[in-house]
Amino acid sequence: MLLSVKNLHVSYDRIKALHGINFEIDEGEIVCIIGANGAGKSTTLRAISRLVPVGAETQMTFMGKNLIDYQPDKVVSQLGISHVPEGRRLFGNLTVMENLKLATFARKNGKEIEQDFEQVFSIFPRLEERKRQKAETMSGGEQQMLAVGRAFMSGRKVMLLDEPSMGLAPLLMMDMFKALEEINRAGTTILLVEQNARLALKFAKRGYVLESGDLVLEGNSEDLLNNPDVKKAYLGG
Amino acid sequence: MTLTAFLQNVINALQWGSFYALIALGYSMVYGILLLFNFAHGDIFMVGAYIGFFVASGLLLLVASLGIVGLPSWVVLVVTIILAMFITSFVGMAVERIGYRPLRGAPRASAAITGLMIGIILETGNLALLGARRLSFPALIETTTYNIGGVSITNKKIMIVAVSLLLMFALHQFIQRTKWGMAMRATAYDFTVVPLMGVPLNTVAALTFGIGSALAAAAGILFGVAYPVLDPYMGILIGWKAFVAAILGGRGSIFGAALAGFLLGFIEIFVATIFPSTLRDLIAYSIILLILTFRPHGFFGEAHTARLRL
């Protein structure tokens, strides 16, 4: 088991966002968490990245290490858990190349970085073409490529993806998921949260259903796709 | 005004503008990164001047005790500036660590009040340590006056403006070309996702305070070279004026802060050529108030977001 989350509690002020959820991810897997807007999907990813404080009873381990001991930047630089945040959140004032370079800030091995640059440009050739362009001047699809490419450059073990399909036209969406499959084949475990349940379950092998801060269902993607409750609530009947 | 008088005033304005610009940069950088104004910054300028005083005095003693003769006077000055900038940067980082970091996420007013308190502590701490006497900054370089077509210009003024411009150029290069500079630009744009790049946000914040304080120290020493009287309250008025420059330039804009610093120098000096000097600040700052009425976000500021822009 690569990542294990037990009894994850998160509160914002006095409002509880997550009520003690449990899940696990094995090395090399693609796992998704589906759920409605406000169910706590982003909060789950933000908790793993240590961007939000978790409850005292929460346990999170990654490769046998206690995640809670790590500062947010160390989760990325020492554990290799990258995070594509909701809404991409690129540094619009930086060029494409600078966005990618910044993600390698704490990495030391120059040769590995160079290889990763080659790989990211082979997955997203468009990024190499736009290298010198400011990130804010790119189209939505290109920005999503950069957001994923940036995460790829920051750490290679796990990639957390927050709504990668958001704002993308169907064709671009398919391209994006093909690219993510390629990244997964190259050895990166993927945890993605999505409102677009059909797409997420087709892409992932396994999934969890999050409802108002509780995981209510889990299983193989196929089972979930055929589950009448899931069909009714998330797949449009 | 004759052309000679005009040029004379331009030179004086450039000198004062240098002080304001160097201090304003620190305000603006910290605002760009942390969205707070470090109201202790004027007192960091004072601390920098004092550190410069002790470094320079120490160096002069050292040079004398080693019996070194014929050492060009500018060598001591350059070493003083570098050493004092370095030491003062740690004062700035300590201010961030002790004063501001524990308040990250607290209401902004708390941080502003903290800055004011730190300022008072630095002023009165200095008073407690050194007493109420004024110190006289050692004369590191002899004044030479050149006369170019009726315009008299001293080597000190040339040095002050040149060192200031050099430091601004160095800052620009640092921010544009280094990886830490890139991290600062990214932090100014959106600090919330900076940790996701593996960048330690606290270190970026500390570095920003350090650089801003180092620039204030340079301003303090240059000020000491031009006006060699130091007292614990010397940073208050000049600090507020530099703060005005930072606002006028546009919050978080480095280029704007430098430009507005020089503009302030020009407005002050040229107002004083027309009106009695006792009315100088009254009129100069009324003009600036008027400018801000028409451009409330300053020259390069944005309405809702303040970003470090270069």
Image (cartoon, coloured by chain):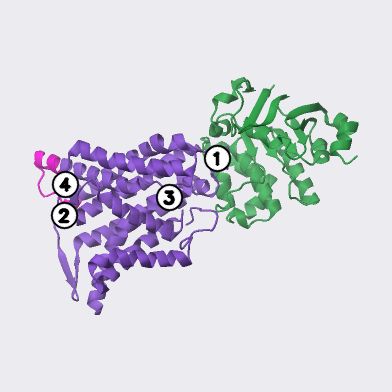
Chain colours: A green, B purple
The verdict on a common chain for dots 4 and 2 is yes
Q: Which residue is mark 2?
A: B141
Please tell me whether residue A207 is drawn above or below residue B279 in the rendered image: above
Q: Which mark is residue A104?
A: 1
Question: Which secondary structure, mark 1?
Answer: loop
**Of labels 2 and 1, the one closer to you:** 2
**Of labels 4 and 2, the one closer to you:** 4
Residue A140 part of the magenta segment:
no
Q: Which residue is mark 3?
A: B29
| Residue B185: image location, x then y, percent | 50, 49
Q: Mark 2 or mark 4, which is nearer the start of the sequence?
A: 4
Question: Which secondary structure, mark 2?
Answer: loop
Please tell me whether residue B310 is drawn above or below residue A76 in the rendered image: below
Label 1 is found on which chain of the structure?
A
**Of labels 2 and 3, the one closer to you:** 3
| Residue B285: image location, x then y, percent | 35, 64
Residue B69 part of the magenta segment:
yes
| Residue B29: image location, x then y, percent | 43, 50
Label 4 to label 3, Cα distance in Å? 31 Å
Q: Are marks 2 and 3 in contact (CB under 8 Å)?
A: no
The verdict on a common chain for dots 2 and 1 is no
Q: Which residue is mark 4?
A: B134
As rendered, which of A112 and B1 lies closer to the eye?
B1
Give the residues drawn in magenta, as a range.
B60-74
Outermost residue to the bottom: B2
Question: Which secondary structure, mark 4?
Answer: loop
Q: Amino acid at mark 1?
A: Thr
Q: Amino acid at mark 4?
A: Arg
